[in-house]
Amino acid sequence: MKLLVSPLSVEEAIEALDGGADIIDVKNPDEGSLGANFPWVIQSVKTAVGKKVPVSATIGDMEFKPGTAALAALGAALAGADYIKVGLFGVKNEEQAFRMMKKVSKAVKDYNPDKKVVAAGYADYTRINSVSPFVLPSVCEKADVDIVMVDTGIKDGKSSFEFMGEDGLSEFVELAHSCGLECALAGTLKFENVDALKRIKPDIVGVRGVVCGGDRKSSIKKELVKKFKESLM
């Protein structure tokens, strides 16, 4: 399993890198679960990280606006992101998810086919009235998306495990793999979830709060990144 860590700044990115993160994920929690950061922050992180590890960037908890999402995705790609992540927060059904991700994928892949597109659903989809993550693997296979993931839409301390359970998350990972996709799991993951993550076997595990000492508004600490990565081995 690869460890994705989400810093807010260049300084945090270096902490995550020094702790052994496999992917550096640039986001902005002030704008939501998958809030977008500024292009110059993505550029600065990419410059600081260089070619040591890939850089991921979120483009927001998006409403169903394929044009807006496609333009934002291209912006993230131009800023240097290797992985471009779209939160399908305001997307209500399978048809909307396909239309959204197809346009995003076209925008990114026409610019650089080596860039990876990530579609993010939400474990707490019922409480935010969003599309079910279980339909996303088949959608993403048809829409030329590379990775499908689950996060939590509302950051209130509840994890993806509390909404989908180990069985549900396992099913999601199996669906993704059966569609030929990589799969990522995130959403207030904790050290107590590590054993279950090892059983579920996602390709990527995404964290922030747990490597900040439990408070995602605090700062990333390289020793906690190292500890969490070693726990996954």
Image (cartoon, rainbow, N blue to C red):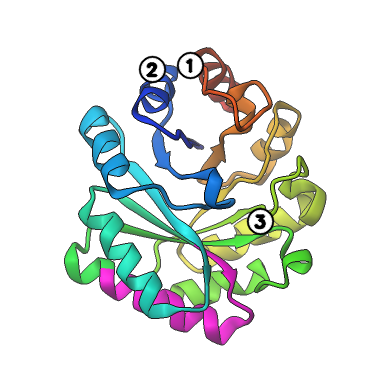
Compute the Cα span from label 1 to label 2. 6 Å
- Foreground disc of the pair 3, 2: 3
Task: Assign a secondary structure to mark 2.
Answer: helix
Report the amino acid beneath label 2.
Asp
**Residue that label 2 marks:** 18
**Within 10 Å of the Cα at label 1, are there few (<14), some (14-19), or many (20+) other Cα atoms?**
many
The answer to whether residue 162 is above or below residue 71 is above
Q: Give residue 170's position: percent from left, percent from top.
A: 69, 54
Task: Assign a secondary structure to mark 3.
Answer: loop
Task: Assign a secondary structure to mark 1.
Answer: helix
The answer to whether residue 94 is above or below residue 75 is below
Q: Which mark is residue 222?
A: 1
**Residue that label 3 marks:** 153
Residue drawn at point x = 44 percent, y = 35 percent:
8
The answer to whether residue 71 is above or below residue 79 is below
Is residue 106 inside the magenta stretch?
A: yes
Q: Give residue 201's position: percent from left, percent from top.
A: 60, 44
Residue drawn at point x = 23 percent, y = 50 percent:
79
Quadrant of the image containing the C terminus: top right
Q: Residues at badges 1 and 2 in contact (C-beta under 8 Å)? A: yes
Residue drawn at point x = 24 percent, y = 41 percent:
43
Report the amino acid beneath label 1.
Lys
Compute the Cα span from label 1 to label 3. 26 Å
Q: Is residue 124 left or right of residue 21?
A: right
Instruction: Tell me which segment is drawn in magenta.
Output: 87-107
Q: Is residue 153 left or right of residue 104?
A: right
